[in-house]
Amino acid sequence: NAGVTQTPKFQVLKTGQSMTLQCAQDMNHEYMSWYRQDPGMGLRLIHYSVGAGITDQGEVPNGYNVSRSTTEDFPLRLLSAAPSQTSVYFCASRTGQGLDSPLHFGNGTRLTVT
Amino acid sequence: ILNVEQSPQSLHVQEGDSTNFTCSFPSSNFYALHWYRWETAKSPEALFVMTLNGDEKKKGRISATLNTKEGYSYLYIKGSQPEDSATYLCAVYDRGSNYKLTFGKGTLLTVNP
């Protein structure tokens, strides 16, 4: 199993550009989520999904869109990048059987918006 | 937003020392607490998931306890080794969180050889 795979690993965008961060998991996990990590802050939840076709907002959803058309994939879209979105982004998944299942994280995407 | 506090922010210990750090959270509506280890240039990896008051979990030299009535968890490392150097993250679900796991800011542990 590859686990949780994120692409790209690094990305530089100009303000106003759009892009999609990809996340795929091969563990048949129902729950998937996106977090961002900023200096001095804890991991903050952007969006999450409890299954295909179902998404919801986390703590910091503004400026980001998500969709979940398959169990395996959960892409994060930046529609018009802003410097405030410079961050390290982590995708994480877990089984949907309960909140006591641990999260499995991808290796992260480091995004810089100039 | 759930407030999850970790202390200390960072600490330095010598190889062989035992150490512990704290995660505090609101005790009302508690559901589950997770501990993760996050090594530099890697992704967080789960250590423990704890749900019951009085829970104790152990993995090698690392152990954790949970007190849901007073809203805290301790993570202990016995005989620290340089490879234990990492950021240790605590995260909490409460019953009102609607599937949102809230993370603390972490404790950065550095073990000097």
Image: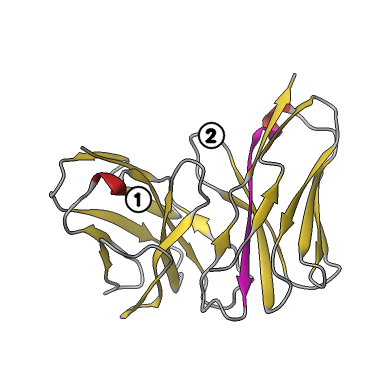
Q: How far from the left and from the top, in percent, is residue A104?
A: 51, 57
Question: Seen in the image, is B64 located left or right of residue A86?
Answer: right
Q: Is residue B92 magenta?
A: yes
- Neighbour tally class for label 1: few under 14, some 14-19, many 20 plus, Cα within 10 Å: many
Residue picked out by circle 2? B40
- Between the residue at mark 2 and the residue at mark 1, the CA separation in whole angstroms equals 17 Å
* Residue B102: quarter of image: bottom right
Relative to residue B22, is residue A46 depicted above or below?
below
Residue pointed to by mark 1: A6
Residue A105: percent from left, percent from top: 48, 53
Report the chain holding disc 2: B
Describe residue A54's horizontal placement relative to residue B19 as left or right.
left
Residue flagged by tag 2: what amino acid is it?
A: Thr
- Which residues are drawn in magenta? B84-94
Q: Residue at x 30, y 80 (%)?
A: A53
Q: Is residue A16 visible?
A: yes
Q: Position of residue A34 (x, y in %)?
A: 40, 60
Classify mark 2: residues with Cα within 10 Å, few (<14), some (14-19) or many (20+): few
Residue B59 seen: no
* Quadrant, the C terminus of chain B: top right
Q: Amino acid at mark 1?
A: Gln
Q: Is residue A102 above or below residue B31?
A: above
